[in-house]
Amino acid sequence: MRTRRRFIAATGQATLGVWVVTSNAHGALAETLSVLEADTRLLQTLARVARLIYPHDGLSDSVYVRIVGDLLGDPQNTATLSIGAANLGEFLELDEAQQIAALQRIENGPFFNAVKTPLMGALYNSPELWTMIDYAGPSFPFGGYINRGFDDIDWLPTS
Amino acid sequence: MKTYALTDDSVVVVIGSGAGGGTVANELAQQGVDVVCLEAGGRMSFADIENDPPAMDERMGWLDKRIGPGVWLCKTVGGTTVRWSGITPRFLAHEFKARTSYGLNATSTIDWPLTLEELEPYYDRAEDKMGVSGTGDIPLYPETNNYKVLHAGATRVGYKQITTKHVAINPVARDGRPGCQQLGFCHSGCKIGAKWSTLYTEIPKAEATGHFEIRPNSMVLKIDHDKTGKVTGVVYRDRDGVLHEQKARAVCVAGNVVETTRLLLSSKSGLFPEGLANGSGHVGRNHMRHVMGFVYAVMPGPVNAHRASRQNGMVLDELDHREERGFAGGYIMETAAGAPDALMGTMSTWGRSATAFTDRYDHVAGLFVTGEDPAEASNRITLHPTEKDEAGLPVPVLEYADHPNSVAMRKHAMSAGAAIYESLGATHLYMSTELTGECHNMGVARMSENPRDGVTNKWGQAHDVPNLFISDGSVFSSSAAANPTLTITALAIRQAEHIAERMRRREL
Ligand SMILES: Cc1cc2nc3c(=O)[nH]c(=O)nc-3n(C[C@H](O)[C@H](O)[C@H](O)COP(=O)(O)OP(=O)(O)OC[C@H]3O[C@@H](n4cnc5c(N)ncnc54)[C@H](O)[C@@H]3O)c2cc1C
Ligand code: SF4
């Protein structure tokens, strides 16, 4: 289970079809497909929740999908995340204001925080986000900022 | 390197190697007293310190189970001084007389059995040891962008005491350590050693005396005593889970508040049924954590606050006690900055109100508030009756609630901080009272004149156990407003002098 979910997470949804065909040569195809559809919907719902928690227009969906996919890959989270997502009902069909309102109703609950806390760690340590906000990460290799602008502010009023 | 036998009962055992333990151990060793320091964490070198906060959290964080509000500590040689920011103001004269100064009669606030005057010479020595900016002949800390914003805004709203003094990070090379290179990863350990940490100051200096042995990966489980109630040694667990007993002439406990409590309570016996040194019932009580909060602001121009040390300057105008503000005690506003995950980790908000800050990360300025937190007996740490952690120790349970004084102070401080940035045209403001975990921990074995009111005397010596000393922030009688570590270090220097003197006089 873990490996398959990680696989989905790592490759995103676009390749799901390919995976189904290549790994289910013998039977059980229908069953697997419905599981995968459920998985896809779960993944999409969680990715949408993630984007609404920390909406960065400059980030593509694949970043959010990868992070929630990793979360789902941890068996400890599976129950909380799938039950929480199921409780959101037809979430993907709602408009953005309704989605935000739905999340506000559950923002103190276990599901919301099971997404938000690890999302925070993963998103704000991700290279895509760092590039977008021009954060360079480790500075030791560059000798710190002592000669690279730690005190270069130039717009402050003088009085 | 010097080593001592487990059966050697002439040594002083120091538990913990952070600000309190590392300092008391080195100061004892400098005076020729033989010391064995037992430290639960491993020993890192500069090569192990990386600009990678999540990896460093794993490597040095204290991850053992606790119940209740979080505390943010380290399990590593050097303790939380590997992680800390280095802000080091002194406590003020009136703060040592909290009860007299503030009243607060409904709380368990007491005066220290110690005055500022008595501690001043040790503050001098602590500042010299730690290389505190603006003290002695040490220059002020350089003015960073985040500080310049704080300074400009604070000046606009009329504050006057704005300074880069009181920072225990080398502005220039000193004491065998380099000047700060503004790496900006102070909370993951300073990779070059510009920031004071016992890991690369007190510990190697103690080793050089030939009177000191540190045993990393050694978690003390229990302190033993004899029939007369004198401490005789400690039981610890090594990295392989094997238990040992190290004999001792005296024991100094510096596990940092939660662990100091756990150790004293776990060491209960027939003679000390409520826990070692707990005749007063105060062990674990009066846990103080400072009134804390962050103010973040999106400024009209770039700040790039992360391109510098985490904390590096402060406003001291709100530090005094002024009754007209409607609360007792004062607070300090200090610059604060962090990597994107550290910024978001202290913001509970989500949606656009959160990403307004990360989308304009380079424009964010920030400050951190630390203020007086009254002692309350109900803010306490106990041991879980049944739940044990992997070392077989009972899990600590923390109970903590804000006193109305703290609520009033925080409100005042948050709007004062916001006004600083508003005066410069900030476009977004966020006031945060969520910390990843509490950083400043004090109380739980407080000094008291009267043995009924606390656990230790003014030397940090247990009222009930003559050769047991508490050497960390647990002994604070009140929290004062300033960050605690300079005071922990000054008290540790003073305590070591006292212990060595008592030993010379054969009283210990
Ligand atoms: C992010 C952050 C920033 C901070 N910034 C500042 C600042 O700017 N200014 C300031 O004054 N303070 C600051 N602090 C607080 C400062 O780190 C502490 O006040 C200081 O380190 C406390 O010293 P200590 O010796 O009591 O405990 P620690 O430094 O935590 O050391 C305790 C040591 O004891 C060991 N230990 C515990 N129990 C046992 C046991 N049973 N057996 C063996 N070993 C044990 C631990 O592993 C640890 O190494 C900050 C803290 C944090 C988390
Ligand atoms: S900013 Fe200075 S003190 Fe902080 S980690 Fe870098 S060099 Fe060390």
Image (cartoon, rainbow, N blue to C red):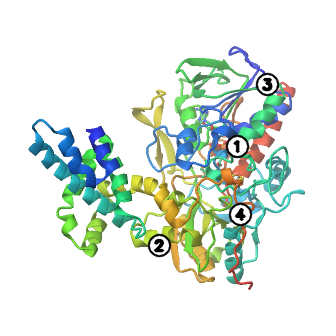
Q: Disc 2: which chain? A: B
Q: Looking at the image, is mark 1 or mark 3 earlier in the sequence?
A: 1
The reply to whether dot 2 and dot 1 touch (C-beta < 8 Å) is no
Mark 2 is surrounded, within 10 Å at the Cα level, by few (under 14), some (14 to 19) or many (20 or more) other residues, namely many
Please determine whether, in this image, residue B275 is positioned above or below residue B345.
above
A42 relative to A157 in the view: left or right: left
Which residue does the image show at 61% across and 56% down from the upper left?
B109
Give how far apart the Cα atoms at labels 4 and 1 are.
32 Å
Q: Which residue is mark 4?
A: A148
Depth check, mark 2 against mark 4: the one in front is: 4
Look at the numbered discs 2 and 4 and tell me whether their residues touch, using CB distance below 8 Å.
Answer: no
What residue sits right under mark 3 in the picture?
B34
Instruction: Return the x and y of residue B365 as percentages of the image width and height.
Output: 60, 70
Separation of marks 1 and 3 at Cα, in angstroms: 19 Å
Q: Is residue A127 visible?
A: yes
Per the image, label 3 sits on a secondary structure element best described as loop
Nearer the observer, B98 or A72: A72
- Give whichever of discs 2 and 3 has the lower sequence position: 3
Which amino acid type is marked by label 2? Ala
Q: Mark 3 — on which chain does it sit?
A: B
CB atoms of marks 4 and 1 within 8 Å:
no
Residues packed near mark 3 inside 10 Å, few (<14), some (14 to 19) or many (20 plus): many
Q: CA distance from mark 2 to mark 1?
A: 38 Å
Which residue is labeled 2 in the image?
A: B356
